[in-house]
Image (tube, rainbow, N blue to C red):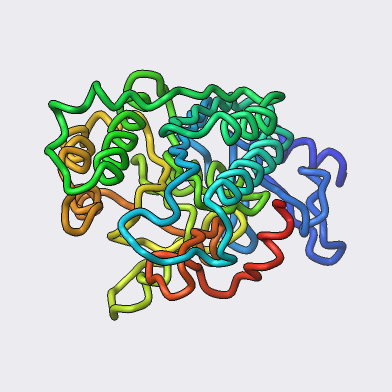
Amino acid sequence: MKKLFIKLCKLLGFEIIDQSNFLSPTLNKELNEDLSTINKKSIVLPLGEIKITRKIEQILIIVRMNTEVEIWDQNKKRLFEQPKIEYSIRSIKSLINSINFCENKYPGIKIKTIIVDDNSKNENLESIKKLIRKKDFEIISLDHSKYENIIKKQKSNETFSNLASLLQSFELGKQLGNDLIFFVEDDYLHFEPMLEEMVASYERISSQINKDIFMCPSDYPYLYMNNEKTNILIGNKRHWRTVNKTLCSFMTSKNLLNKYWENFEKTCFDRNDPFEKYLNQIYQNEICVSPLKSLSLHLTNVNSSYGLSPFIDYKKLWEENS
C-alpha cells in the first residue's frame, strides 16, 4: 500500500515528507539534500514547493576587465595591496570555478562568457588567456574610438574608459543576450556556489512574483548605513533582501535590459553622481535583491562603503583563488 501511495503521489505531482526517517520517498532523497529540480520545482523546508514558471535556459556573462588601474577615481590601495592584474586573475579564476560548479549541477543551462578588455598589456592578456583556454570564453578589446562622440568629454582618460567599457558591455548584452545576462567587474571574488545559487534563486523568486528581477551577487556595506526598509525573500539556499541601489555588477534578463535601455545608456553617457544614478532609478519600479550573506566579495579598500561584505573570511577566499 505504501509503495502504491508513493507512486500515486508521483503521478499527481505531490511530494511526501517522512519526518521520522528524515527523507522524501517520492524524491528518493534525504531532507538535508537539495530537493529542488532546476526549471521544474523549488522546494525549501518547511515552506513547501514552488512551481517554476520562469525557466532559465541561457546565461551570458560579460566581464569588464582592466588589469592596470588600481582603483578607478580613488588614490587608495585595495585590500592586500597587490598589483591590479592579481585581482583580475583571481577574480576570473573564482568565476570559472563558480561556472564549473553551476554547469555540473545544471548541465542543461548554456553559459557563455565575454571579457571586455580595456588595453591590457600583452603579458597580462596572455596570463588571462591561459586561465580561460578550456572554457567558453571570448575576449573582446574595448573600442575607445567608437564612443568618442557618444560619451561626454571627461576629466580623465580613466573615467572615459570606464564609461566606454560599461556601454560596450551593455550593448553586447543587448545584441547577444537571449535570457539572463550577468554584468560583472574584474575586482570581485566569487564563492564557488555563487552562480548556482543566483540561477536557482532567480527562477524561484521570479516564479513567485511572476516577473523578471535584478539580482546583485554582493552584500555591500553601504546597504547597512541608512535605516532603510527592506523585504526578506527565500532563495534556493539562503535569504535575499530587496535593495534599491547596486553597483555595476548584477544579473538581469534580456527583457528588462530592453525595457530600461534608456537608463542603461544614460549611465554611460556621462559621469553621474552617484555613478549608478540611472540604474538605481530602475529599482523604484522593479525588484532588485542581494544575498545574505554575500556570494561575491568586492575587493576595494578596507574602508570603502562600496567594498568588503560583512562576515566573510577575506583572507581565506583570497588564498583559495591564488
Residue 219: x %, y % from top left: 46, 64
92 sits left or right of 202 in the view: right
User: Foreground: 176 or 131?
Assistant: 131
Numbered-mark total? 0
Q: Can you see residue 36?
A: yes
Residue drawn at point x = 79 percent, y = 36 percent: 7
**Res. 134 image quadrant:** top right
13 sits left or right of 242 in the view: right
Residue 195: x %, y % from top left: 58, 44
1 sits left or right of 27 in the view: right
User: Foreground: 75 or 6?
Assistant: 75
Residue drawn at point x = 68 percent, y = 33 percent: 131
Residue 75: x %, y % from top left: 36, 64
Query: 237 above or below 313?
Result: above
Residue 269: x %, y % from top left: 16, 38
**Res. 126 image quadrant:** top right
Query: 119 above or below 158?
Result: above
Residue drawn at point x = 70 percent, y = 52 percent: 321
Image quarter where the N terminus lies is top right
Residue drawn at point x = 62 percent, y = 44 percent: 89
285 sits left or right of 68 in the view: left
